[in-house]
Image (spheres, rainbow, N blue to C red):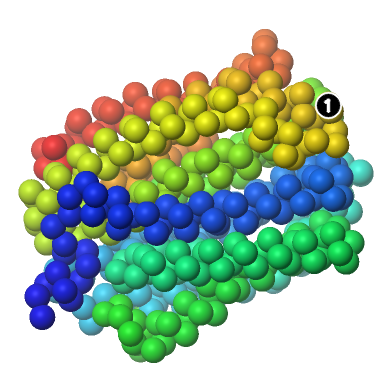
Amino acid sequence: MTETQKNPLAEDFNAISLIRFAIPSMVMMLFMGLYTIVDTIFVARFVDTNALSSINIVCPVINLIVGLGTMLATGGSAVVAKKMGNGNTEEARSDFTLIVVAGAVIGLLITAAGLLFLDEIIWGLGASEVLFPYCRDYLTIQLMFAAGNMMQVLYQNLFVTAGKPTLGLMLAVLAGIANIVFDYVFIVLLQMGVGGAAIGTGIGYMIPTIIGTLFFLTKRSELHFCKPKIDASVLLKSCSNGASEMVSQCSTAVTTFLFNVTMMKLLGEDGVAAITVIIYSQFLLTTLYIGFSMGTAPVVSYNYGSRNVKQLKKTVRICFCFIAGISVVVFLFSLLGGESIAKVFAENNRNVFEIAKNGFIIFSFSFLFSGCNIFSSALFTALSNGKASAAISFLRTFGFITVFLLVLPRYLKVTGVWLAVPIAELFTLMLTVYLICRHRKQYHYF
């Protein structure tokens, strides 16, 4: 058996084959985005916009769970893929098993701690008296599925590392369809309100979690479960290497909180509902960048670990060209389709619709810059440079955006809120270009 036949990451990729390899991850992330955003659409149209606002109020907790899972997943994937590239397959399997077990344990601990301090968390996130009951119903159920959320995030990354991106795609599609069906059943037919949306999402988490666990138990791929060696250094390396993704999610949690507080002050509950429409739409549209980065990162790690400089250069060049092209497409879609997107969410509330529609006109420009920043952060993670990756993620999702979000609304009111993200992405792009140029001789990707 040749190396390529044994491990798909060893293929001599060209532009078409690399994009084809990444497409399952891109579609998988798109479906993840769709079944996440479906909750907000069903809630906005079949409950009310206050329920929509409540989802965004408690969103920082979900960001924390996803952030921990993504940190372990992306950092651990780089560790595992590099060892596979070096030929240390048994060690890679042990590390993989340890990372998955750690993720499950962390999820259970989050459930226990979250339910114990549930009311304090909700008030601390800035819920009003009107929004508190909605927040409590939604967050209680989300916390009960915390371990499933962690596991599905882990598997989404590790399916790619195992050379099975299509399986990850199939499970994401299945989970997305299940979430849509159960949202309809629980929210529309059974009138369970925002709690029904949380149950539908939780069931969506469990589908890839259960099937993924069974798949890796059957030893049908080179990467599968085994008796792990308890090595804290592996977890520390995974966490430090994936720190940028954790920084990104935690930063998103903080900035979501700041967005909510600012819009509540400027425009009340309708303002929070409008920013919820923008934030969830941003998440959906950036899934293409995230999915492509997730799909190509193991290829970068493998070629870096196997010291295949020629293929590494080729891969990185293709990636940046693709990201540039797709960024223009996403920008135009957001700019021209913002009104239609706002209408999907807020057809029954004219005020929320007008606020969100006007926001899209300015906010759309962020998509021109965010793709390169997201991929570059993933690139440095794949090269085991957690510091550079974390710097990009921290500044684009927290550092710059927090400064602009605190300053601009004081002078420009709501317009300042919409400008905060595009300007933050532009400043981050300047840093990204500097880091790419600075490290090119170290990694030889150009």
Q: Residue 79, image x and y in percent?
A: 28, 64
Residue at the spot of label 1 = 351
The amino acid marked with disc number 1 is: Asn
The quadrant holding residue 410 is: top right
Q: Is residue 307 left or right of residue 17?
A: left
Question: Residue placed farthest to the right in the image?
Answer: 129
Q: Residue at x 50, y 37 (%)?
A: 397
Mark 1 falls on what kind of element? helix
Q: Residue 209, image x and y in percent?
A: 53, 74
Q: Residue 76, image x and y in percent?
A: 35, 64
Residue 406 seen in the figure: no
Tell me how many marks there are. Answer: 1
Look at the picture and state if 207 lies above or below 377.
Answer: below
Disc 1 packing (10 Å; few <14; some 14–19; many ≥20): some
Q: Residue at x 30, y 58 (%)?
A: 21
Q: Is residue 401 left or right of residue 138?
A: left
Q: Residue 335, image x and y in percent?
A: 56, 25
Q: Is residue 445 left or right of residue 274?
A: left
Frontmost residue, 229 versus 44: 44
Frontmost residue, 6 versus 107: 6
Q: Residue at x 84, y 59 (%)?
A: 188
Look at the picture and state if 47 lies above or below 331.
Answer: below
Look at the picture and state if 39 lies above or below 258.
Answer: below
Quadrant of the frame with the C terminus: top left
Frontmost residue, 173 versus 417: 173
The quadrant holding residue 415 is: top right
Quadrant of the frame with the N terminus: bottom left
Residue 170 seen in the figure: yes
Q: Residue at x 26, y 80 (%)?
A: 222
Q: Is residue 47 left or right of residue 178?
A: right
